[in-house]
Image (tube, helix red, strand yellow):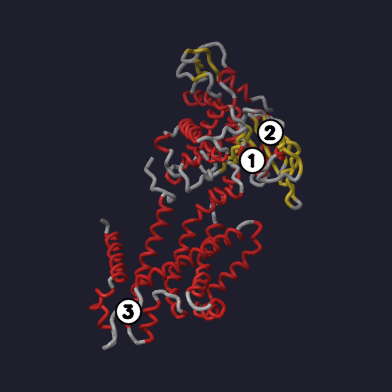
Amino acid sequence: MIEIDQITKTYGEINAVDAVSMLIETGTITVVVGTSGSGKTTLLRMINRLVEPTSGGVRINGEPTDAIAPYLLRRRIGYAIQGHGLFPHQTVARNIAAVPRLLDWPADRINARVDELLTLFGMDPDEFRDRFPQELSGGQQQRVGVARALASRPDLLLMDEPFGALDPIIRARAQDDLREIQRKLGSTIVLVTHDMDEAIRLGDRVGVMDGGKLVQYGPPEEIVERPANGFVANMVGDAERPMRLLSLIPVRDLTEEGAAEGSTVPETASLRDALSACLWTGRDAVPVERDGAPIGRVTLAAIRHRVGQHP
Amino acid sequence: MRPATILRLALLGLLLALVLRPHAFVWMFKPFAPERGSAIYDRTSLLSLAMNHLVLVAVASLAATVIAVALAIFVTRPAGEAFRPLSRTITNIGQSFPPVAVLALAVPALGFGARPTLVALFLYGLLPIFENALTALSTLPPRTMEAARGMGLNRWQRLIQVELPLAAPVILAGVRVSVMIALGTATIGSTVAARTLGEPIIAGLLTNNTAFVLQGGLIVGLFAVLIYDAFVQIENRLLDRRRPAPRKAA
């Protein structure tokens, strides 16, 4: 568990980060979202002490981060940034092995870890190990950047706009991959972004920052349905709220007895997908399936009822 | 074999012949020699002069490299930031001082021979290396440096593992310029009795023997061309794989 306790950073007269407290559960993704200048990156950089807090502190699994030298702390915390920051003079394998080398892992353990990570990120080790970063596509560079941050199995992974430099299609894939890899490894991730879609898509919990303050912190459903103030509502976007909410709710939740015509949707799909299927094919209900077998249906009326509770 | 390689080997062959078998070139230099003068400089072996010349250049350039790079590293650290303008002034003075003046001033202190020449070459070589190293170390890719810091490399590790390797090609280009200057300037060392390839040139100038001047000049020139080329080869090799490769269509 990561405990951020009344952390503040003051530059001159201005509180870039103003008494922010957060509890981050182990094995979850926490996304901090805000506009530029909201203090989100400063908050992130105070966790690994790239920025020293003016007051307040951070504890990782009960241990205060100011108890050890910053560079030793950082070796235990993965760090991935926008535009990856790979070392251009080193091969992919050497880049990924950077932190394990600092930690003096034996060579065979490092090699095995590099191959394991490349495989995990869908890159054939034999093909990519000895390439240089400039020889990779943007999406591949980004994956190597995340693989490097995960290499030493850190307690915590910090990501600063990790997908900011990717085009929308590759970004969506990278987000899905991150979700999947995080579930597989059980990593704890704190990710900073300005993109509310990304926050809702990835976050187990979402924190919204404005003017250095954490204005709301909760599960994405709560952020969408009950924004704490006008700023959060604005970030979520009035017109997109219904769709964002639907994208968070699985079809399973609204499945009812009964039959419907036409193509099916899996129970793990989101209500947004179900609504989309209804609208596109002009149906009032779509059948729901689990492992290929029909288990009921979800109706347009039920979806409307679920969303329309906001007078 | 590529044409560039053939040209390189031809120039190397010519250089070796000029140094090792100078008398084979009588036909070439005869037209430039005075009527009863010798066409080939043979008061000293050209080989030993060439070796001496190269050693002087190498020692001075090596020292200039070590000092200039160390200085550039120092002034790009937070602790040395304040000394940056001063260090530039000092290296600029080193450059703007005419080498002959350095020699004239150094002789009373250091005596005749190789030592004042070394000092002049060293002072003269500092600036290009320092300027290049300073530029390279202060324009490193910020995201790469941020990542290096964020993943827990300490200052020393960042310098050795990231900053210097990334700056190396640009620093090397500075060393190349500096070595070129030193190769030429070392000939002037012969005026204070340093044994360099300036000896035939000075002797030729004193006795109105153009053949000697050409002989010395040609050898120094060939050394310069070949060493320059070698530096460029190394720089390119360092940069080769860092350049973005042409993307294949997805």
Mark in front: 2 vs 3: 3
Q: Amino acid at mark 2?
A: Ile
Q: Quadrant of the C terminus of chain A?
A: top right
Q: Amino acid at mark 3?
A: Tyr
Q: Which residue is at 47% across, 67% downward?
A: B178
Q: Quadrant of the N terminus of chain A?
A: top right
Whether callout 2 and callout 3 share a subunit is answered no
Q: Depth check: give the residue in front, B183 or A200.
A: B183
Whether callout 1 and callout 2 share a subunit is answered yes
Q: Which residue is at 55% across, 11% downward?
A: A257
Compared with residue A123, is residue B145 higher up or lower down, i.e. above or below?
A: below
Residue A204 visible in rendering: yes
Mark in front: 1 vs 2: 1
Position of residue A76 measured from the top left corner of the image (x, y, whole percent): 62, 36
Callout 3: SS: loop
Residue receiving disc 1: A72
Q: In whole angstroms, how far apart are the C-alphas of marks 1 and 2? A: 14 Å
Direction from residue B205 to residue A230 in the image, left or right: right
The circle drawn on residue B41 is 3
Name the chain letter of the residue that bears numbered label 2.
Answer: A
The answer to whether the residue labelled 1 contacts the one labelled 2, judged by CB atoms less than 8 Å apart, is no
Position of residue A24 measured from the top left corner of the image (x, y, whole percent): 68, 31
Residue receiving disc 2: A60
Name the chain letter of the residue that bears numbered label 3.
Answer: B
Position of residue B66 measured from the top left corner of the image (x, y, whole percent): 53, 61
Name the chain letter of the residue that bears numbered label 1.
Answer: A
Callout 2: SS: strand
Q: Amino acid at mark 1?
A: Leu
Q: Residue A193: which quarter of the image?
A: top right
Q: Which residue is at the far bottom? A: B35
